[in-house]
């Protein structure tokens, strides 16, 4: 029996199996054999990646007599197609357990969440602490603080994504990040600073909003404070991710509209020459309040989970989400300082800008109150979501089963404290900005990133901020300098009074 070799069936390789997935720089990489037409998808953190393989072509018959040139081309093509790297920018997928459908985060909702969280009660206090320095000097300070807070937010994001990759779970808060990178000491610093800042700022928000609602509705302070906490707390408690995002979007648009109307009305008597004032020696006094006005890092872990670890989207949401408040802060500061050029107010005397605007015209008052209330509401929602997620991770409680307890723990203490001292607004902002924000959202993110990059994860860590150790050193040094300066100044004032 003879076998003819003139026409031979050459089987194709159909047993190509993807190698073990690699997580490099926050990107899931799979090495695939292109000839097997394998595609991949991953659901959740706890499930293993599975692959859908198209129906393979089992064999292909080709004549034996093929020109050398064609055979050479086929071999070269096989070698080129031997291996390719498929990158997935998403770290995981948000899966609705009820519908078993993926609920991807919206970039626009993420931007609105960052912008809404950033624009809060701090914007109302900026003109009060920048009157002595003047508009030009305070504008430079605002831009520098914005750049600083963008960098620290990106540092929080990169550590958060690396922690989610390593722990294999979503919803990772600052506690888990600090524990993984800085150990028990980092957990203590992060926990107490986080709780202190959030409770302090929530107290300030409720105190300011209750005063506005009392003037508008004519009800007692305790009723207006309870009403504000109940309405916005219910939105966070009962609302889904998309509903809260849509609510934030509506509030941000309302914020912009009321701000535009306010600027139009209040800028009628603007003294342009007053905007040229620049006293850079008085700038350090305003740094804590300005830095506090750009706080949004508390929602970065929520942001990373909602956007499924998609690093380009996270970066875009942080940069654009904070750029909107920067523009609002600069315009707001210009209108206030340009309207009151000769106040003669020292930096240590904080005058409420609401009272200043109300005294100029009866028409300005309603616009001021509307803008202030919406600004506080957007920030309040972001802080409630961030603090609830923090308590869930700190106490190791499942959010679904313990949701009522977590929201009571978040909403009730600030409400009670705000009722004890309704005039606590400026005190709370100054204390939180000086001793809390620059530690929790200044020094700590850089320290966690340093450990993550050079101790824990080494070269495989995701890096959203360039510059290496130089950038991290500058961040920690700048925050530490402001904190020490404030401590020395406050101590000197205490000695002079005593």
Image (spheres, helix red, strand yellow):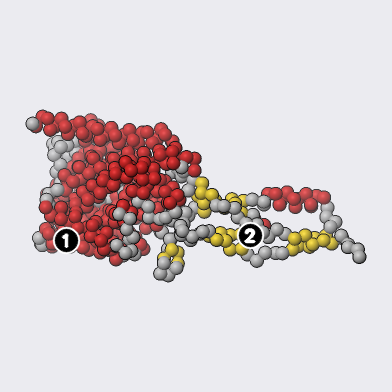
The residue at 51%/46% (across/down) is: 24
**Where does residue 451 sit, x and y in percent of width and height?**
40, 39
The residue at 32%/41% (across/down) is: 185
Instruction: Determine the secondary structure under disc 2.
Output: loop
The residue at 12%/59% (across/down) is: 222
Relative placement, left or right, of 88 versus 224 is: right
Q: 10 Å neighbourhood of mark 1: few (<14), some, or many (≥20)?
A: some
Lower sequence index among marks 2 and 1:
2
The answer to which image quadrant residue 391 occupies is bottom left
The residue at 45%/67% (across/down) is: 101
The tag on residue 226 is 1
Foreground residue, 424 or 30? 30
The tag on residue 37 is 2
Relative placement, left or right, of 123 versus 493 is: right
**Where does residue 302 sit, x and y in percent of width and height?**
36, 54
Q: CA distance from mark 2 to mark 1?
A: 60 Å
Q: How many marks?
A: 2
Image vertical order of residue 215 relative to residue 494, above or below: below
Can residue 296 be seen by looking at this rendering?
Answer: yes
Can residue 150 be seen by looking at this rendering?
Answer: no
């Amino acid at each position: 029996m003879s076998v003819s070799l003139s026409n031979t069936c050459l089987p194709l390789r159909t047993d190509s199996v993807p190698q073990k997935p690699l997580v490099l720089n926050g990107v899931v990489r799979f090495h695939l054999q292109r000839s097997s037409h394998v595609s991949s998808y991953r659901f959740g953190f706890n499930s293993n990646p599975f692959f859908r393989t198209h129906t393979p072509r089992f064999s292909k018959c080709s004549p034996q007599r093929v020109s050398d040139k064609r055979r050479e081309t086929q071999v070269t093509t096989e070698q080129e197609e031997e291996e390719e790297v498929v990158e997935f920018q998403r770290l995981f997928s948000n899966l609705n357990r009820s519908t078993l459908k993926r609920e991807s985060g919206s970039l626009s909702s993420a931007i609105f969440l960052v912008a809404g969280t950033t624009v809060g009660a701090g914007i109302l206090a900026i003109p009060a602490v920048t009157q002595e320095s003047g508009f030009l000097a305070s504008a430079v300070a605002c831009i520098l603080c914005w750049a600083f807070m963008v960098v620290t937010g990106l540092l929080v994001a990169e550590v958060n994504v690396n922690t989610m990759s390593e722990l294999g779970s979503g919803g990772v808060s600052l506690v888990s990040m600090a524990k993984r990178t800085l150990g028990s000491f980092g957990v203590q610093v992060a926990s107490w600073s986080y709780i202190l800042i959030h409770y302090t700022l929530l107290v300030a928000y409720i105190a300011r909003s209750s005063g506005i609602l009392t003037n508008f509705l004519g009800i007692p302070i305790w009723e207006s404070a309870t009403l504000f906490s109940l309405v916005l707390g219910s939105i966070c408690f009962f609302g889904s991710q998309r509903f809260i995002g849509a609510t934030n979007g509506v509030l941000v648009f309302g914020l912009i509209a009321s701000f535009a109307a306010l600027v139009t009305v209040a800028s009628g008597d603007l003294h342009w020459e007053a905007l040229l004032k620049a006293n850079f020696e008085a700038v350090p006094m305003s740094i804590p309040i300005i830095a506090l006005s750009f706080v949004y890092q508390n929602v970065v872990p929520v942001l990373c989970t909602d956007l499924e670890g998609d690093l380009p989207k996270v970066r875009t949401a942080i940069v654009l989400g904070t750029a909107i408040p920067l523009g609002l802060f600069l315009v707001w500061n210009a209108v206030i300082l340009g309207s009151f050029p000769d106040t003669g107010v020292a930096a240590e005397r904080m005058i409420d800008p609401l009272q200043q605007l109300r005294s100029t015209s009866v028409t300005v008052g309603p616009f001021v109150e509307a803008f202030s209330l919406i600004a506080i509401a957007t920030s309040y929602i972001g802080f409630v979501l961030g603090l609830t997620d923090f308590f869930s991770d700190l106490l190791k409680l499942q959010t679904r089963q313990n949701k009522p307890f977590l929201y009571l723990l978040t909403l009730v203490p600030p409400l009670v404290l705000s009722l004890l001292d309704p005039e606590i607004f400026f005190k709370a902002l100054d204390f939180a900005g000086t001793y809390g924000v620059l530690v929790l959202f200044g020094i700590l993110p850089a320290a966690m990133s340093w450990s993550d990059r050079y101790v824990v994860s080494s070269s495989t860590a995701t890096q959203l901020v360039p510059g290496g150790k130089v950038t991290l050193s500058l961040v920690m040094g700048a925050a530490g300098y402001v904190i020490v300066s404030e401590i020395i100044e406050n101590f000197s004032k205490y000695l002079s009074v005593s």
